[in-house]
Amino acid sequence: MIEIIGVSKKFDDIVAVNEITLPIRENSVFGMIGTNGAGKSTVLRMMSGVLKQDSGEILIDGLEVYDNTKAKSRLFFIADEPYFFANANAAEMEAYYKSIYTKFDTEKFYRYLDQFGLEKRRKINTFSKGMKKQLALLLGICSNTKYLFCDETFDGLDPVMRQGVKAIFANEMEERGLTPIVASHNLRELEDICDHVGLLHKGGVLLAKDVEDMKYNIQKVQCVFATQEEEEKALKALQVIKDDRRGTLHTITVRGSREQVEQVLRQTETVFCEILPLSLEEIFISETEVIGYDIKKLIFG
């Protein structure tokens, strides 16, 4: 388990991270969302021991991470701009990381290289941005660490490669209990991969919740009510967060379980009614609007 407790970090007069607290469970995918400057990269660098926090604690399985090789042996950090030795190729980077991570799986690494179409003897400085991201991910995965920290991992990957990486994550989680922590400015990139999501804003944690819990407790309903009286009765009985109307068609975001919402609707006379799945984006918009923020401006500009 990773514990981030009351952590702060300043650079001169700039507060990059302000007293954040986050528990990150094992064997689940944690998504860290936030605009550029929200503090995501700084948090990841402190979690990996590259930077030392000014205050608070960061514990990897109960171990302080900064200046602690035992804690660092349990994690692999992939920066937004992955670093490779000058003029190195994939085989040379594999040899380097194998000398550091004792459980590095060479056979798996070269199998993945073939699957992704990456040449082991080709100079990495001739790779595209997406190819470099792929190589960094494969090195991280094959290092067989318990935790994998990824900063803007899917940025630069095409949709096919993105799905391939997600499939590898799922397989590694099932086989050996890998715990990926993925930071991104794009909520949509993490839509179908994260179990738990934290929203960072101006160095603080605005929201941190389990995705399934959020999906369970918020529903989206599209319906046309039979009469004005039925509309008023239903809206009064439901915990309405948002009601968008286009003519007689209501698209209502409501708080509560699907069963609770269905019970109200069964007692309401409608011309048309259905409960629709919500995207992670829609859930976050609903949750942050309640506490006075517009996530569309925070995340999507």
Image (cartoon, rainbow, N blue to C red):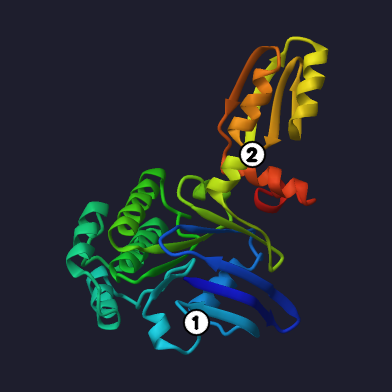
Q: Position of residue 51 (x, y in %)?
A: 55, 82
Q: Is residue 265 left or right of residue 139?
A: right
Q: Looking at the image, do the residues carrying marks 2 and 1 touch, with CB atoms under 8 Å apart? A: no
Decide which of 162, 224 is in the foreground and name it: 224
Dot 2: what SS? Answer: strand
Q: Is residue 94 above or below residue 176?
A: below
Dot 1: what SS? Answer: loop
Name the kind of residue labelled 2 in the image: Ile
Q: Residue at x 72, y 49 (%)?
A: 288
Q: Position of residue 157 (x, y in %)?
A: 42, 52
Image quadrant assignment for residue 73: bottom left
Q: Residue furthest left?
A: 107
Q: Earlier in the sequence, mark 2 or mark 1?
A: 1
Q: Position of residue 24 (x, y in %)?
A: 52, 66
User: For mark 2, what is the residue?
Assistant: 218
Q: Position of residue 70 (x, y in %)?
A: 38, 85
The CA distance from mark 2 to mark 1 is: 37 Å
Count of numbered labels shown in the rendering? 2
Name the kind of residue labelled 1 in the image: Gly
Q: Is residue 76 left or right of residue 90?
A: right
Decide which of 289, 113 is in the foreground and name it: 289
Q: Residue at x 29, y 79 (%)?
A: 101
User: For mark 1, what is the residue?
Assistant: 49
Q: Which mark is residue 120?
A: none
Q: Is residue 238 left or right of residue 159?
A: right
Q: Residue at x 61, y 43 (%)?
A: 281
Q: Is residue 268 above or below residue 164?
A: above
Q: Residue at x 65, y 47 (%)?
A: 284
Bin the neighbour count of mark 2 within 10 Å (Cα to Cα): few under 14, some 14-19, many 20 and up. Answer: many
Decide which of 44, 268 is in the foreground and name it: 268
**Which label lies toward us, 2 or 1?**
2
